[in-house]
Image: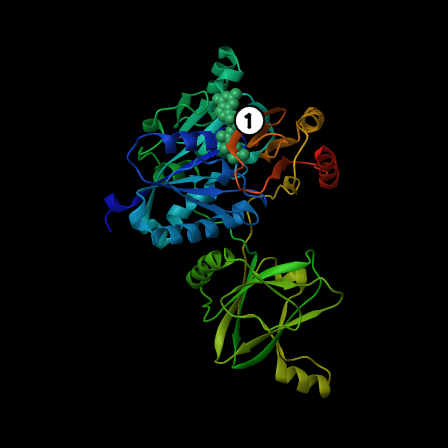
């Protein structure tokens, strides 16, 4: 395949509420003659964004899975793989990342994986900046700085909310952070399509100069042990660890040199993007599948491996072997030895081990809360509650969005909030769709129970 035939991809990034979906909708509704496939990377359990993207012939896919920085690459490979099966239906791809994502691992996907690299080319990274909130976001979130640093184009949006002087100061701050990017100002993300699509702007060599570690991947697993095993039945036993479950993929025929370990890791990135089957103690672990070991009960727990042929198996575990004291033992020897001298020389030592250390720190405090309720809401009560909540906690609540069913209103109401600013606007008719409410909050120090209780008081 020649370079010309690759599908161009633009990544839309920017902190929560900066205007990514607004820009996306603008692009989708403009006459540009392109058939665009959209990939939404949504954060949180409830998919709101898909409902906010305008109805268009464009294909919308969603991904939402675990820690964004570790799992996004596997998710994206899966979604892009599905897209390729409908290659004749589109000629451009737009990826909207969640506002909490570091765009690095998203961009990396287009260079790390051979199949993806052969089919797609990263055209550029467009970062939306919320002129009213970026100062506070840059101070509090590494992702926000990374989004600015990775941009090929910075769209300084929401210029209606700040003075021209502030915009000038902001623009020079952004230029200091990223001298390569073009900066354009906008209201409601109104920029000409030529400034954001078909730029051929992403330059891997330049990125590597500025950031030599760009192609060093982050993995959704922390440890690999390779064991040379005969045909037979084995016990995989674990102690309690810090988490009640642990993800695992067992690969067959896993080599032990550096290249083989890296190849195994890459194929695990894909397998980890499949949803995990929950396995209880006593279960046999399937090979080449993403499973989640249930470890909640007291004491040491056993799972089993059945091998029809001698092989090298690679265990790719979510946490390190040390944390759960993972042991592999040959079972028939285990029984024989336990009966004779009590010594366990059935234990198999790994031929090689490898720890994959994540560079990033997980910001565990940031979480999303979703409230989903059937029924109608009293608009006044809801407005009073949200105004109070956002004025008290607006610093910690980065983003509010969702759909609300107002009593006596035939249309669905769309709620949009960024920190303390929020709006409610009528959208499409409910029609035959059951009237319901979906509200998502993303932020720190959120009290889910209390928020649900308060919401319920707003129902009629
Ligand atoms: N005042 C003002 N509001 C804007 C502007 N652009 C977008 N908005 C509003 O800001 C809110 C967030 O916009 P979105 O486009 O949903 O932002 P987003 O980046 O997709 O949000 P997330 O996906 O949650 O990160 C919406 O209510 C928009 O209508 C602008 O230029 N000025």
231 relative position to 341: left or right: left
Relative to residue 337, is residue 425 drawn left or right? left
Residue 135 in the image, given as x and y percentages of width and height: 56, 23
Label 1 sits on a secondary structure element that is strand
- Assign the C terminus to one quadrant of the image: top right
Q: Is residue 323 above or below residue 158?
A: below
Compared with 8, 349 (above or below) is: below
Mark 1 neighbour density, 10 Å: few (under 14) some (14–19) many (20 or more) = few
Place of residue 432 in the rendered image (x, y in percent of width and height, measured from the top left): 53, 41
**Residue at figure coordinates x 58%, y 80% from the top left:** 233
Closer to us: 349 or 80:
80
Q: Position of residue 36 (x, y in %)?
A: 35, 40
User: In the rendered view, does 44 fall on the left or right side of 380?
Assistant: left
Residue 225, quarter of picture: bottom right
Residue placed at 60% from the left, 32% from the top? Answer: 399
Of the pair 356 and 395, the residue shown nearer to us: 395
Q: Is residue 195 in view from this perspective?
A: yes
Confirm whether residue 131 shows in the render: no
The colour scheme of the drawn protein is rainbow
Location of mark 1 (residue): 425
- x and y percent of residue 194 in the render? 32, 28
Query: Relative to 394, is 320 above or below?
Result: below
Beta carbon at label 1 within 8 Å of ligand 1: no
Front residue (pair 7, 422): 422
Residue 368 occupies which quadrant of the picture? top right
Q: Residue at x 49, y 29 (%)?
A: 19
**Camera-side residue of 237 and 398:** 398
């Amino acid at each position: 395949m020649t370079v010309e035939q690759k599908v161009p991809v633009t990544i839309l990034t920017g902190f929560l509420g900066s205007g990514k979906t607004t820009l996306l909708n603008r692009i989708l509704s403009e006459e540009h003659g392109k058939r665009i496939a959209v990939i939404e990377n949504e954060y949180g359990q409830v998919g709101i964004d898909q409902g906010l993207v305008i109805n268009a012939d464009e294909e919308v896919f969603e991904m939402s899975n675990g820690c964004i920085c570790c799992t996004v690459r596997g998710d994206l490979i899966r979604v892009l793989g599905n897209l390729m099966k409908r290659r004749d239906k589109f000629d451009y791809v737009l990826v909207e990342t969640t506002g909490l994502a570091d765009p690095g691992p998203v961009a990396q996907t287009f260079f790390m994986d051979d199949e993806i690299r052969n089919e797609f080319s990263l055209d550029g990274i467009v970062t939306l900046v919320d002129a009213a909130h970026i100062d506070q976001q840059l101070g509090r979130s590494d992702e926000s700085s990374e989004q600015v640093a990775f941009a090929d184009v910075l769209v300084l949006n929401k210029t209606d909310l700040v003075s021209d002087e502030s915009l000038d100061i902001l623009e020079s701050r952004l230029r200091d952070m990223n001298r390569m990017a073009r900066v354009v100002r906008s209201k409601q993300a109104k920029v000409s399509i030529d400034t954001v699509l078909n730029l051929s702007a992403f330059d891997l060599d330049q990125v590597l100069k500025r950031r030599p570690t760009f192609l060093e991947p982050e993995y959704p697993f922390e440890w690999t042990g390779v064991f040379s095993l005969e045909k037979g039945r084995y016990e995989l036993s674990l102690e309690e660890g810090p988490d009640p479950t642990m993800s695992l993929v067992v690969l067959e025929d896993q080599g032990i040199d550096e290249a083989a370990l890296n190849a195994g890791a890459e194929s695990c990135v894909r397998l980890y993007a499949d949803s995990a089957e929950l396995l209880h103690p006593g279960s046999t672990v399937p090979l080449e599948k993403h499973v989640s070991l249930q470890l909640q009960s007291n004491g040491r727990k056993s799972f089993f491996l059945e091998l029809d042929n001698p092989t090298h198996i690679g265990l790719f575990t979510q946490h390190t072997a040390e944390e759960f004291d993972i042991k592999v033992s040959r079972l028939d020897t285990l029984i024989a030895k336990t009966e004779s001298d009590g010594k366990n020389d059935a234990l198999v030592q790994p031929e090689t081990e490898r720890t994959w250390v994540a560079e990033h720190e997980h910001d565990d405090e940031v979480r999303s809360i979703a409230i989903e309720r059937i029924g109608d809401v009293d608009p006044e009560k809801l407005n009073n509650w949200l105004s109070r909540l956002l004025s008290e906690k607006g610093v910690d609540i980065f983003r509010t969005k969702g759909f609300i069913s107002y009593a006596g209103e035939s249309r669905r109401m769309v709620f949009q909030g960024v920190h303390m600013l929020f709006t409610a606007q009528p959208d499409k008719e409910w029609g035959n769709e059951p009237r319901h409410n979906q509200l998502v909050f993303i932020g720190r120090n959120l009290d889910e129970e209390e928020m649900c209780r308060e919401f319920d008081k707003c129902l009629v």
